[in-house]
Image (tube, rainbow, N blue to C red):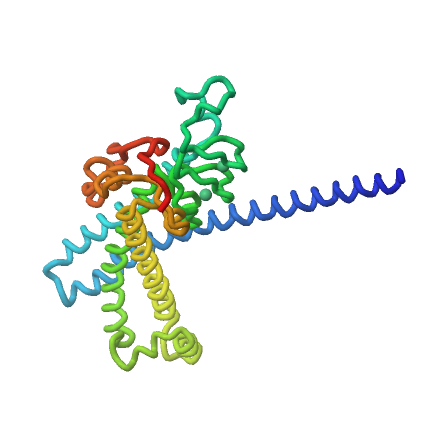
Amino acid sequence: MEEMSWMKIDTDHNGSEHRSFIAAHSRTLVSLMHLVGVIYMLIFCSAVFLMEIFLTLPYMEQYYPNNSSFKTVLSYYIYVGIITNFLLILIHRKKSHFSSDQLTGLPFRAGNNFQQVPSDWTKCKHCNIQVPPRTRHCSVCRVCTLKKDHHCYFTACCIGFYNQKYFIIFSFYGIVGGTFALYHLIFYLSSSYAPFLSVQIYKYFLPYSFMSVLFGYSSFSELLLIIFLFLHISNTAASTYYFFWQMFLIFRNQTAYEFLKRTRTVDMTVSEHLQSVFGPYWLINFLVPVPFLLNKGDGMHWPCKKNL
Ligand SMILES: [Zn+2]
Ligand SMILES: [Zn+2]
């Protein structure tokens, strides 16, 4: 009997050790995915910009010399806009985190008595605290996030109340910059490799491109440009998807989670919701980064309504 209880303790001990081993490894994997995601975005955006400045725009200048300096300035403008908004997503990521520390400053908390919190607050079973409406726990960040929309591996954080505007503007610049640079890259490849919109489009299929390099019909740099073209198309498509998806959710007064759950927590006009995401002069954010123009509200107090 004594031996059996010893064995049980040992099994439990091994089991918890095994679980913590898996947990530690999955944390390492998540950190690695975050690191790869952030580095990929920074390298990709910089590569698009450098390709514009040193390859495609000088090439196009031969054909269209009149507006080349305007295009160069526009490339710099888009690059600054995209990198600034990407960094602002990261800088503001922790502002949306909601923990027991934030409860300390709230007027309705008395000692450790959380019973006085507003009736629309719910309990997070992971953090064991009462959280405001629209706040959701993120199992990746291991914290509750105010107005959590989704967790993004490319920015290594949750998109929530304080960084959603930078995420949307980053996606917007991704569409503008992506389409702009894509046009120049296709022009360059159409002139120097094979016409893109023609029967020779098969030359852009990756198996053909690989074989073509192997048999010496095309160069390795051309293969790299074709791989880059595919990355470019997919990233521009992803930016388009995220921008229109986020704007659609704002117009519906929902987060991605609320949309999937078919609930509408808040009762706001479109203009109020736009201001809660972008701040009072919301359109100006699309022209220049204005992090000092804060979005309206605190992410905790919402004009709530009943479920649909
Ligand atoms: Zn939580
Ligand atoms: Zn997260």
The outermost residue toward the top is: 111
- How many discs mark residues in the rendered view? 0
Q: Quadrant of the N terminus?
A: top right
Quadrant of res 272: top left
In terms of depth relative to the viewer, which is nearer, 145 or 269? 269
Pick the residue in front: 262 or 197: 262
Q: In terms of depth relative to the viewer, which is nearer, 36 or 220?
A: 36
Q: Nearer the viewer, residue 163 or 39?
A: 163
Q: Is residue 31 shown left or right of residue 269? A: right
Residue 31 at x, y percent in the picture: 51, 46
Rendered location of residue 205, percent (x, y) = 37, 75
The answer, for residue 90, to whether it is visible in the render is no
Residue 173 in the image: state x and y as whole percent. 26, 51
The residue located at (35%, 38%) in the rendering is 161
Look at 38% across and 70% down and name the residue there: 223
Displayed quadrant of residue 175: bottom left
- Residue 134 in view, yes or no: yes
Residue furthest to the left in view is 66
| Left or right of 88 in this view: 32 | right
Could you tell me which residue is drawn at 39 percent across and 39 percent down? 134
Q: Is residue 74 above or below residue 121?
A: below
Where is 91 relative to 251, above or below? Answer: above
Residue 204 picture quarter: bottom left
Residue at 28 percent of width and 37 percent of height? 276
Residue 35's spot in the image, x, y percent? Answer: 47, 47
197 relative to 211 in the view: left or right: left
* 129 vs 106: above or below: below
